[in-house]
Image (cartoon, helix red, strand yellow):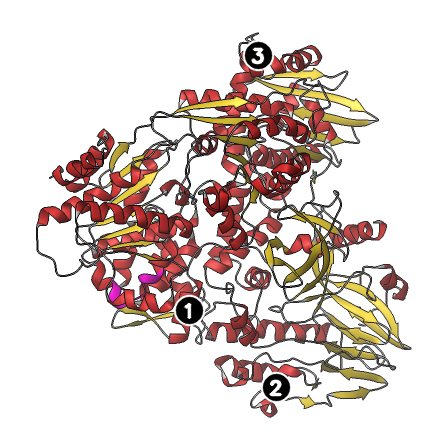
């Protein structure tokens, strides 16, 4: 049965890789599967050829092209057209009577209508467009003949609400199409088994695991500065390395520079072109806030058009979704943050089989030297991060219930079973199900039935959407991607440069200069959600900070950093990175000691009558933030005092004007995992976090409307912000499960509750070293110097907060 | 604490619960209730718990608490032109006919289009009228030369300094001769008033707090207990 494929491959001069053969055979044998490999190619053909071979084996004559057989789900629209070209090549190469077409948010309405009557044999689409298709009756009929769904870049969807949305759609398709097999294509993760099962739901046998060949060697090099100063290493030393980075750029034909944040990308782009004006036309900037047109241009230049580019400075906006030939070298500015992430970025260089993927790390402070070494060690040991699927988010379920009611309607018991057949909702309780049903039927729980409300209602035991208006609103609102309110940045001529968060713009005064899109701009005014700017000269201007740019160090990488420190503590200075850090770490050992996985280090110091405690749990920045707040609260409870916490990826600084306890017995109590949850909720002002989180939930659950400014104008009497919903639910429907979900999401994602919990449990088994510092140690110094972003534990009432904040404003 | 001020010689108390009280005539002022708004949303398939009837009850209990003899609504009593024709309309009608004291409505932009407005048990006042020397209007008139109470704006203040925590709160806003009341309705949004723009008073559930220096200067101290 594989013959047509092997023939086609040999005609092209290719070899069939063993993993491709395994994938095809497994598909033909009726199995689901997951194709995963850290880097490398051939995964697309591994996934698509099986369904093509199956069709060829049927040998039925065809009139024109076949009805729909395959859905190819891609997380990004930008990927779709490149994928289509690759699939068409295979379809034509094998001579299968298949048509291939895209359906994404960019597809025209006329084309969409035409497609619905007869879908292409292979449909390439996004999770959102697929869900929208499920609301059309004529489409559901056609889906009955589906043989395969392929989820491309599954690791990108897994762990997000888009992944959950895909889960639900897949569960629906499995029920409609008895011959359906679901396949995923993914980068390697720490939890590939779970990732595979999430594709097919809890009721199907485990999918075939197909490990792609990784023919590439990965080399991680860290750019070492000439001299490592022993203490003055807290700030942005990175830009000092610009000359060294420029040297590397000039040595190669093509380079991608990855940064961790958009602000960092802007800063580096400016620094590079200022230092090397001759490269101005050969260096470009790419990040998610830039105008689509500007990004498209950079992407096509990356593919070699318009004379090509020598270097692109980019955020994760180029991590996936943009298919271009591999570059000569990849440079990572600042902490790698995660092992898998660094691996994926490295994979952007040297795509040819047998080639070496090289990534050059540029540390922006001393400890990052160790992080690159740690990432390399973790790659060698194969320790990659996991992506955990989201557990049963009710906002997505509420949206799905309306979707399911739209095309043919549903019977409650059938749909419940179907929903539980998706991985995310496998543990959905009856109570949660009923609540979601009540929410779409009556707007709340059974006790408060509102007669004028219903999104769906039952007719002959089938639930259907009650009105055309609701159906239209729902179609406009499908999806789980939410964006912050953004202000467009444009010249007076109307030429748009991109988008910046409103909070940044609102702090600018007319005439202020800021850096955006690699340019120095002067802010003029805001007009209808557009910030009008003009070009400015000079070198000093503010760089916008976008929210959410600060990722924590992953658990795997943090553990590996501790291993590195352990080796250093044992006198193993065998790598270049450790050698460069030797003076610094020896000073750490001299003034205090080097923290190791077996021993928790606590340093304390009194300086200018203020008391400081430094603690190094290595749990990542977010978990440190939560832990710092809990410890401040517990300390403040022991005796009345105001404790402030500051964190980084290495540790926590606690400071206070009153003495802080420094004995082990007290600290063992303070670090007890018991009562962590209530203490965390109390200390982190969790209500404010939930309120912000609720914004996204309100959108997904269909409370607020997304986008469409013109539609907004028309329905003024239907305008409400998520804040208003939050308040009114809080006051009149406090048991609303969407509120609970907001809190759960804050705990899991924003505060990394489980990571704090496991850090505290780990600490229980560690010994403690308590060191009184005479002088600051190299590890405590960056924490000591950092005073911004402090969390002060607040247990104040509304009245106290209003008074304090208005006093602060008066003094500013 | 509540705040006691004088607006062009007329004494007023700014009270917790988002209402103002005039002691010499025992009148309670309230603005922008937007009754029926939650119902409008529900009718369009957006689930919002019921807040209109509880709001009306809350106003009734404030009326009793401060022993007011009259209530004046400074516009936008109702949210949607069809509010009174919906299921909720009957409850609102009943709530108003059971109301303990006479209610006067200075009609706002939302009220003017409401169908069956005359079915409500209340007195409809002039759109720009005067009561015992106090000018009453839904939309504030910044050029007013006589003391004036208004609504419409839904003023809020945003507290906090750059980079630090922020807090958004409904507020009373006084400038020149005009005092704009915070929106009374639970399910209403707000319009940010700049920190230096006149006097701002945070409108809490337990307290009213003068926010900026102008507001502190305007406050005459704690009023006599109106009860």
Q: Main secondary structure of the magenta part?
A: helix
Q: Earlier in the sequence, mark 3 or mark 1?
A: 1
Query: Which residue is rendered at x = 62% and y = 72% of the image?
Result: B55
Label 2 belongs to which residue?
B97
Front in this rendered view, residue A261 or A471: A261
Front in this rendered view, residue A619 or A278: A278
- Number of numbered discs on residues: 3
**Image check: A101 left or right of A382?**
left
Front in this rendered view, residue A200 or A602: A200
Q: Describe the element under mark 1 as helix, strand or loop.
A: helix
Seen in the picture, residue A770 relative to A533 is either above or below; the reply is above
3D distance between C-alphas at marks 2 and 3: 81 Å
State which mark lies toward you, 2 or 1: 1
Q: Identify the magenta region.
A: A132-139
Q: Within 10 Å of the Cα at label 2, are there few (<14), some (14-19), or many (20+) other Cα atoms?
A: some
Subunit of label 1 = A
Label 3 belongs to which residue?
A568
Q: Quadrant of residue A792?
A: top right
């Amino acid at each position: 049965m594989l013959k047509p494929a092997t023939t086609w491959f040999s005609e092209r001069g290719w070899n069939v890789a063993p993993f491709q053969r395994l994938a095809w055979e497994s598909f033909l044998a009726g199995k689901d599967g997951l194709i995963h490999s850290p880097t490398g190619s051939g995964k697309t053909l591994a996934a698509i050829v099986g369904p093509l071979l199956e069709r060829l084996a049927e040998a039925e004559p065809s009139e024109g092209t076949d009805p729909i057989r395959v859905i190819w789900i891609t997380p990004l629209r930008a990927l779709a057209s490149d994928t289509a070209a690759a699939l068409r090549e295979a379809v034509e190469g094998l001579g299968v009577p298949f048509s291939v077409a895209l359906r994404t948010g960019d597809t025209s309405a006329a084309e969409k209508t035409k497609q619905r009557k007869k879908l292409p044999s292979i449909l390439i689409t996004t999770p959102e467009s697929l869900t929208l298709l499920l609301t059309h009756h004529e489409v559901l009929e056609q889906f009955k003949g589906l043989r395969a769904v392929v989820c491309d870049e599954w690791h990108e969807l897994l762990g997000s609400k888009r992944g959950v949305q895909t889960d639900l759609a897949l569960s629906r398709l499995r029920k409609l199409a008895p011959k359906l097999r679901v396949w995923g294509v993914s980068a390697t993760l720490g939890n590939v088994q779970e990732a595979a099962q999430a594709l097919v739901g809890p009721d199907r046998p485990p999918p075939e695991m197909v490990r792609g060949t990784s023919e590439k060697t990965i080399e991680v090099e860290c750019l070492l500065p000439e001299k490592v100063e022993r203490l003055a290493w807290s700030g942005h030393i990175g830009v000092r390395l610009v000359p060294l980075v420029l040297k590397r750029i000039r040595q190669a034909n093509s380079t991608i520079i990855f940064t961790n944040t958009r602000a960092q990308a802007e800063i580096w782009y400016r620094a590079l072109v200022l230092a090397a004006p001759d490269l101005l036309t050969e260096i470009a900037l790419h990040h998610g806030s830039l105008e689509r047109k500007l990004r498209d241009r950079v992407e096509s230049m990356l593919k070699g058009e318009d004379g090509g580019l020598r270097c692109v400075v980019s955020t994760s906006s180029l991590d996936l979704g943009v298919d271009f030939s591999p570059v000569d070298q990849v440079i990572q500015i600042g902490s790698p943050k995660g092992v898998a992430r660094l691996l994926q970025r490295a994979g952007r260089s040297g795509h040819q089989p047998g080639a070496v993927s090289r990534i050059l790390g540029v540390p922006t402070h001393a400890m990052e030297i160790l992080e690159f070494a740690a990432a390399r060690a973790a790659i060698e040991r194969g320790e990659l991060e996991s992506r955990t699927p989201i557990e049963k988010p009710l906002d997505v379920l509420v949206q799905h219930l309306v979707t399911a009611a739209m095309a043919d309607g549903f019977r409650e018991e059938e749909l419940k079973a179907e929903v539980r057949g998706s991985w995310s909702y496998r543990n959905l309780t009856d109570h949660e199900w009923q609540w979601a049903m009540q929410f779409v039927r009556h707007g709340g729980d059974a006790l408060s039935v509102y007669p004028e409300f219903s999104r769906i209602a039952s007719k002959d035991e089938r639930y259907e959407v009650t009105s055309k208006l609701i159906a239209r609103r729902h179609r406009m609102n499908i999806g789980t991607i939410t964006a912050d309110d953004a202000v467009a940045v444009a010249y007076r001529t109307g030429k748009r440069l991109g988008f910046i968060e409103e909070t940044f713009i609102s702090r600018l005064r007319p005439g202020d200069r800021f850096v955006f899109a690699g340019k120095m701009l002067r802010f003029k005014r805001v007009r209808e959600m557009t910030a009008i700017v003009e070009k400015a000269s000079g070198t000093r201007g503010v760089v916008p900070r976008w929210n959410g740019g600060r990722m924590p160090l992953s658990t795997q990488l943090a553990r590996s950093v501790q291993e590195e420190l352990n080796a250093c503590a044992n006198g193993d200075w065998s790598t270049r990175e450790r050698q460069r850090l030797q003076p610094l770490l020896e000073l750490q050992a001299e003034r205090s000691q080097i923290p190791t996985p077996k021993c928790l280090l606590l340093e304390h110091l009194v300086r200018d009558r203020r008391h400081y405690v430094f603690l190094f749990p290595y749990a990542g920045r977010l978990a440190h933030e939560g832990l710092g707040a809990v410890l401040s609260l517990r300390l403040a409870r022991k005796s009345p005092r105001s404790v402030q916490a500051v964190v980084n990826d290495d540790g926590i600084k606690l400071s206070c004007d009153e003495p802080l306890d420094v004995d082990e017995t007290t600290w063992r109590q303070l670090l007890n995992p018991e009562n962590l949850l209530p203490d965390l909720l109390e200390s982190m002002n969790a209500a404010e976090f939930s309120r912000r989180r609720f914004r996204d939930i309100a959108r997904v659950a269909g409370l607020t409307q997304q986008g469409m400014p013109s539609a907004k104008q028309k329905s003024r009497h239907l305008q409400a912000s998520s804040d208003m919903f939050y308040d009114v639910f809080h006051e009149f429907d406090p048991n609303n499960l969407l509120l609970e979900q907001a809190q759960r999401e804050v705990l899991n994602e924003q505060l990394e509750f489980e990571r704090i919990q496991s850090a505290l449990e780990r600490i229980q088994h560690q010994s403690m070293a308590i060191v009184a510092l005479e002088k600051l140690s190299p590890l405590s110094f960056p924490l000591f110097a950092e005073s911004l972003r402090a969390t002060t534990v607040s247990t104040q009432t509304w009245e106290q907060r209003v008074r304090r904040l208005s006093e602060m404003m008066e003094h500013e | 604490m509540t705040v006691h001020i004088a607006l062009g010689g007329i004494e007023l108390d700014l009270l917790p619960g988002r209402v103002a009280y005039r002691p010499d005539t025992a009148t309670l002022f309230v603005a922008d209730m937007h009754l029926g708004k939650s119902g409008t949303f529900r009718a369009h398939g957006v689930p919002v718990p019921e807040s209109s009837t509880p709001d009306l009850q809350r106003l009734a209990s404030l009326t009793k608490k401060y022993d007011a003899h009259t209530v004046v609504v400074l516009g936008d009593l109702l949210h949607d032109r069809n509010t009174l024709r919906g299921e909720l309309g009957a409850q609102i009608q009943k709530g108003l006919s059971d109301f303990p004291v006479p209610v006067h409505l200075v009609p706002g932009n939302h009220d003017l289009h409401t169908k069956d407005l005359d079915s409500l048990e209340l007195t409809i006042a002039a759109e720009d009228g005067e009561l015992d020397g106090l000018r009453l209007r839904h939309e504030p008139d910044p050029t007013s030369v006589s003391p004036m109470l208004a609504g419409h704006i839904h003023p809020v203040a945003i507290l906090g300094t750059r980079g630090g925590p922020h807090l958004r709160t409904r507020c009373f806003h006084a400038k020149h001769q005009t005092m704009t009341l915070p929106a009374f309705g639970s399910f209403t949004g707000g319009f940010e008033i700049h920190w230096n723009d006149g006097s701002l008073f945070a409108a809490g559930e337990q307290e009213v707090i003068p926010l900026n220096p102008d507001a502190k200067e305007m406050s005459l101290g704690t009023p006599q207990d109106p009860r």
